[in-house]
Image (cartoon, grey):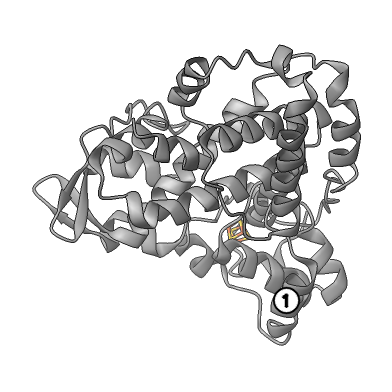
Amino acid sequence: MKSDYLRKYNFLDECKDYLRTIDFNGFEDLEDSKYDHMFKRAMDRIRSAVDNNMYQHSDNVSYEIISFMIAVKVIQATGNKRLLKRFVLYESMVVEQSLQSDIDDKSIRNTLLKKFSDFRSVDSTHQVNLDNVEKDGSEYKVTVADYVTMMNQFNEPEWRLVNQKVDQGFVFIKKNKFIRLMRMGIMKYLEKMISSNTLKLPSMFDEYVVTARGLLEDFAVVPMSKTYPPCMTSIIDQINRGENPNNISRVVLTTYLLNRGISVEDVAETFNNTPDHDSKKTQYYISKLVGYKSYGCSKIESYGLCHRNEKCGNIKNPMHFKD
Ligand code: SF4
């Protein structure tokens, strides 16, 4: 694989092969002060993620790969789930940006697609096999079975199969949408990769781990009221897991909480755990929803967000839910 790709996609297995070719031996080598600037770069990456600042890859392949590797180790050692989510979201957005120019290279496209080809939704037995996604004119075609399995994670109407162009067993997806889809897959891959490795680090990492831990407060569980209906508790559960609810979910929850008389500031706090949280923007968007009625059950159902149970009975609006 071209080294320019390794410079941009630092999480690929091929990066480890590259480091071997330059005789980099991991932790042992990092003890040498000549690698101090790599630690600085790694911390810059983490800070960029926390502050949501644009990260520019340098031209130096080993610099990018090693700083990514250090950043991952530091994040793991902090044990801070919110920091991990933020980092993963941010790095996947950097990938998304690079893909704007690289997506039409079949070799890099298939290499990246392989990273989430083992993705499988909890309620599906279908194994996604994306290696053979093809470009067709200005679109990309994915088999319907793969598409349906992958799209289970999106509730917005724009991702539903009925709203896609489907022909002869394939779904045809426009470039930007396809890149977004790839970004979601890479995000899941990175999260799994970073969460699963808990190697004990040498002491030279200690000061960086302490600094990184201080950059972002870890998740605080959003309190749940027994009087919230299942559709709302499900969205709050998602937030408590550190996931990003989609826009519709956010609007549904926000209008519901506002109609229950909860202040803009307190509703904004509900979203503190989301990886892409920006408190000023959140408060602004919430304030724009003041005065709107809470969504009715049929609308919420049409978004795939209804989790009706016996306590819901025949209510038409979550505001009427009684525990
Ligand atoms: S029936 Fe209404 S209140 Fe109950 S989960 Fe569905 S949308 Fe929510």
Q: Quadrant of ligand 1?
A: bottom right
Q: Quadrant of residue 78?
A: top right
Which residue does the image show at 51% across and 15% down from the upper left? 20
Q: Is residue 66 left or right of residue 12?
A: right
Q: Is residue 289 above or below residue 54?
A: below
Image quarter in which the N terminus is found: top left
Residue 228 is situated, as x and y percent measured from the top left of the image, at: 75, 57
Q: Is residue 30 visible?
A: yes
Q: As rendered, which of 95 and 260 lies closer to the eye?
A: 95
The crowding category of the residue bearing disc 1, from other C-alpha atoms within 10 Å (few below 14, some 14 to 19, many at least 20), is some
Which residue does the image show at 26% across and 36% down from the upper left? 107
Which residue does the image show at 65% across and 49% down from the upper left? 234
Residue 90 is situated, as x and y percent measured from the top left of the image, at: 61, 50
Q: As rendered, which of 261 and 179 lies closer to the eye?
A: 179
Q: Is residue 293 left or right of residue 108?
A: right
Q: Residue lying furthest left in this view?
A: 168
Q: As rendered, which of 214 and 307 lies closer to the eye?
A: 214
Q: Is residue 262 visible?
A: no
| Total numbered labels | 1
Image quarter in which the C terminus is found: bottom right
Q: As rendered, which of 35 and 53 lies closer to the eye?
A: 35
Q: Is residue 106 above or below residue 50?
A: above
Q: Is residue 214 above or below residue 156?
A: above
Q: Is residue 227 above or below residue 202?
A: below
Residue 86 is situated, as x and y percent measured from the top left of the image, at: 69, 48
Type of residue at label 1? Ile
Which residue does the image show at 72% across and 27% down from the upper left? 73
Q: Secondary structure at mark 1?
A: helix
> Does ligand 1 reach within 8 Å of label 1's beta carbon?
no
Residue 104 is situated, as x and y percent measured from the top left of the image, at: 25, 50
Which residue is identified by label 1?
286
